[in-house]
Amino acid sequence: MNLFNNLRAIMERKYVVFIFSAVIFFFLFIFFSLPKNEEDSFLYNEINHQTDNLYVALTLLEDVDITKPLSSEAAQVVKNIVEQQALLARQKRTILFDEQEQFIDASIALAEVRRHLYNLEEYKIVYPYIISKNENELNQAFYRQLKIGKHQVYWHKNNLVILVIFFCTVLGQIWFIFSSLVTADILVEEARHLSVIQGYPRPFWNRIMAKVLKYIYHVCLLIVLLIMASFFLSFWIDSGSLNYPVAVYLNGYRTIPFWSYVILFSLYSLVLGVFASLLSILFNSLTKNTFISFFCSSILFTLPFLFPEVQGKTGMMLTDYLNFIPISQGEYANSQYIQVNILSSFIVMLGCIAVLLFIQKRYLKIDFIRKMRKAG
Amino acid sequence: MKNYLSIELKHFAANKKNKAVFIILIFLGIYYALVDVKNYLPIEHIDEQVMVVDYQNRQKFLENTVINEDSHFSTIYFWETFPKWNKYEEERISFLNKKDYRNYARVSKDYYLYSDKIISESPVPDLMYNRKYYNNRNYFGGQDGHYGYLKTASIYGGYVKGAFPVTKNTINEKTALQSFYRASRNILPIIITFSVMFLMVDHYYLARRHSSIVDFYPISNRIKIFSQLVLGVMSGILSVLMFLPSFLIIGFKYGFGSLDYPVAIYQGNFLNNGNFDRINLCEYFQIFFILLFLWIILVTSSVLLLNYIFKQLFVTIVASTALILLEFLYNRRGIGVSDRYLYFPSSYIRIGEVIDGFRSFFYGNQHLIYQKGLLILVAVNIVILMMLIGLSFKKKI
């Protein structure tokens, strides 16, 4: 406990700002995402998009003569798309007339129809206009669970469950960069209090670990605060069911309840945060500068945007594991060497943390700090 | 002041972080020159194969169709419109084979105007714009196509009249000046404002480290702040200059282009029924650099203000990032119907898109123009500078 008491001595305002800005971002996000009028349904808009795109996909195949026997694959694609159009029209009607059960039935049928499409050779022509195989599987698992669990479909963005799911998608994108920004000066900052470290009655290594633990503590605090914020928001906004299913890729496409999705998301964020802070220590000791180590982390983060063709292909790249959302949706599930799913990502991340810890325990000495101070 | 500025410059040049920022900028520029420009093709690029296939399809339709009293009205519409359409297409192909790009542009201008007319007035939705407008499940493909065709027609009209050579790279928008224009529409202002933010953000901490020099320098606080603003502007200019190598690479690969090239400016109107005016690239860059200058001043002064008030590196970075990237929170199509988004400075960060009117089209608001952006940026700058001057009356800042 002595360790934790001493943490207060090195407390800074930075973490207060960190938590404060994240909570403000949460409120801003909710404010901007709430629908402006009551009939504004995000599911209806999505279905509208799909209808329009199927129309374009059909024009690509306008040479195909479907009056002949359906021998060629192109004709089968046309038939499939026409069937999808009918089902999409049924979905739209059921949203307008608020018929929950019929909507779920239509969605399951639609996913079943689409499933045949991906096996056809001619799918290559129309693929930009039709949702991906992966998305379709997630949809099917989701609507099946809705039917079994007798849940209601939320087609307006006006309850907290849907809003928090959308918030997780946004936060997952920027979490790594955010935590590497917070922890960018984790070791460089020590150079300012060299006399404290030298006179501190504990090994240097303990002090560094205490800083990482402090970061973990603040992330946990942030999560608790966000949960409390959502609790208070639920007085104004409809909260929704906590058992609402969320489709994920977890040894096959399946659904988990909303609360366990949030727990998984928070756990992965925590692990990613620890990884980011250890990486910052490594970059700090190599570059001896706050900003340059932050730039190194940012480069790691931006590489997949610059070279999208390497992302998620092998499962061997570190950049595949920096974003929870595509992992949980199984976008890299067909990677070559290591299958990227939630479980394997946890294992890989923990392995990376162990390696970083080993390296730093072995090679990180107080001499680094002395050199850093000389380097300015 | 001159001496003080030279001390600051010395700090600026000795800082390791600044070198890293410049190196990253150079690498980003080279990536853009080698990868992005190579892969980029505008939707209305030269593609002879597509032209020939479209031409043959329409010709086949005309040969095989017999019009009588029972014909469907859409069939009659196509039968009436296709001959003229095909005439334009035939001329385009013939000029392309002769490599006469100026005449190709002249015919293409008429072709796009006519295509837009018959597609938008078509009684049935079977006639569509170029299918790439509908890619990635774009719901607004029809609107984008209308915008894109009229814009292309306007630009091609400029190619016909201009006193510069028109090449294939000109029409495919690959020359260096056109690539610079394309980057300046959205990504370049964001990168430059970010780099200025990172270059200026730790200035306060350096000053604190040598506080005995800075505090007792025989100069007033206002002049200190002014010299830091000058430093911010200089760092902005340096950041722009870091893209010179990539500009040269693109120029030697695809040609430099001419400053007389036309830029189509969208004049918004009710329900997005606007039309296009033309200015040339030289005028465009003048407006662009004025707005960029205002943005650099805004970022520098807000970084200084935040540093002086909060004295916390993390706050400065988060708050100035929010200032620059706030637009991503509300960046949705048609959101400009409510006027309050016009008064956020962050609505004007994609400077080029504001100037050429794409933001006005995307937001659905005809008042979102660069003149308004100029006013708002000047107003926000004045407010922040007044606050800085107010701070300078303190004995120690």
Image (spheres, coloured by chain):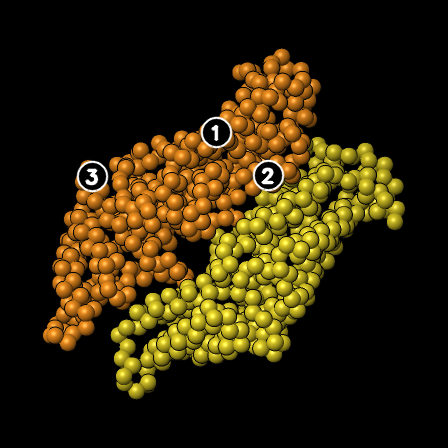
Chain colours: A yellow, B orange
Q: Which residue is mark 1?
A: B379
**Residue at x 63% of width, y 31% of height:** B307
- Choose mark 2 or mark 3, whichever is in front: 2
Q: In the rendered structure, are the residues bearing label 1 and label 3 in contact, judged by CB atoms less than 8 Å apart?
A: no
Amino acid type of the residue tagged 3 in the rendering: Gly
* Discs 2 and 3 lie in a common subunit: yes
Chain of the residue under the numbered disc 3 shown in the image:
B
Give residue A207's quadrant in the image.
Answer: top right
Helix, strand or loop under label 3: loop
Q: Which residue is mark 2?
A: B319
Q: Quadrant of the N terminus of chain B?
A: top right
Amino acid type of the residue tagged 1 in the rendering: Ala
Disc 2 to disc 3, C-alpha distance: 46 Å
Residue A120 in view of the camera: yes
Helix, strand or loop under label 2: helix
**Residue at x 38% of width, y 36% of height:** B370
Quick one: B155 or B309, which is closer to the camera? B309
Marking on residue A160: none
Where residue B208 sits: x, y (%)?
Answer: 68, 26
Q: Which tag, 2 or 3, sits closer to the chain's start?
A: 3
Disc 1 to disc 2, C-alpha distance: 19 Å
